[in-house]
Amino acid sequence: MSSKRKKSGLKCISLFTGCGGLDIGIEKAGFEVVAATDIDKTCAASYSLNYPGVPYLVGTIGSISTEQLLEAAKLQPGELDLLAGGPPCPAFSKSRFYRTEKPRALDDPVAAETVGGYLRILKEARPKTFILENVRGLAYGVHREALEYILSTAAALGYKTNWQIVNSADYGAPQIRERCLVMGSLAGNITPPLPTHAKNTPGIANNLNPWVTAGEVLFDLDTEENASHDGHFAGGKHHQQLLEVPPGDNYLYFTTERGHPEPVFRWRSRYWSFLLKLSPTMPSWTIQARRSNNMGPFHWRSRILRVEEIKRIQTFPDDYLLSGNIEKQWRQIGNAVPPILAFRFGEAIAKHFKANKF
């Protein structure tokens, strides 16, 4: 993959890089990632396989100074074109709305360090533009204060900002994955990209492409050989129920409210993804960071998805190399920003550079 990289006049530093999902899209949009950082050594190993020569600093965001990053990138403060990254999101997740015993938003020490670290580097590196990605929950309820803090801090530094909740499926990913994206610039507002796809709802006319389905991207991988459950057994003690769940449905299929003659579960007694099965005629639901035998989405053949399949769903290139065992590879892909979503927004930032003088 490294041989395909194009040198660009627009330089990007990547924070919370992971294995590089955001970077794939940003580079395709015309930027050159000149330094990256993350705490995960396995992610660093994967990144180096695909981007040899790009400095990747391993450590917590609090332990890495802006000076170190700029030195690795061979840049001075004010010379960086784009700062990109998504601080780890557990503190802003939907589950924290209900897990009141755990700290939420910036009361979580990890969230305080990661969001604070991003904003520290924004202040000290003074990039011309920035993009920050996080889960949808960042914009809602008790978590909203963290978003407001990000926006107010950036504004105080002279950035014009905008934010929006986006669905990756609306930008060409075969996956319903909602995210909060914040963009900022020292040269006025960045115009966000318009959706390229839409749910193909009868009676609604638009000029957009219909959502890409899981079946479209997994078709050539749906072989009899890959249909084997060996090493991909799903459902645990509920495997038999999973076999009976129709494609596109979940455990709620076995409830009284859905009219099942022999109900097994109470209504809304489990997480939505419990025994959740893909439909080949719909986009996938959100790929999670943890490979599980009872939390989906699962393949419509009632097995755990393979790493090459979740790479397709997340829009990673087939030839993107990953380090670590299957659980570590899954986590890297599950935690990543879909490259196609990163590309659409990276492209909007690149257009902003062409239209403005810094």
Image: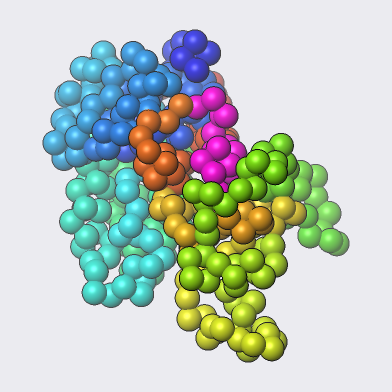
Q: Left or right? Give the position of 253 relative to 22.
A: right
Q: Residue at x 14, y 36 (%)?
A: 63
Between 70 and 262, the one lying in front of the other is 262
Residue 157 in percent (x, y) is at 27, 39
Placement of 20 over or under 94, stated as above or below: above
| Residue 28 vertical position relative to residue 222 in the rendered view, above or below | above
Q: Observer-nearest residue: 148 or 303?
A: 303
Residue 307 in view in this figure: yes
Residue 62: x and y, percent?
A: 16, 40
21 to 296, vertically: above or below? above
Q: Which residues are magenta?
A: 304-320
Instruction: Write down the quadrant of residue 17 in the picture.
Output: top left
Tell me where residue 51 appears, x and y as whole percent: 40, 19
Q: Is residue 2 above or below residue 284?
A: above
Q: Is residue 306 magenta?
A: yes
Q: Is residue 70 left or right of residue 225?
A: left
Quadrant of the rendered image containing residue 306: top right
Q: Going by the image, does 317 lie left or right of 211?
A: left
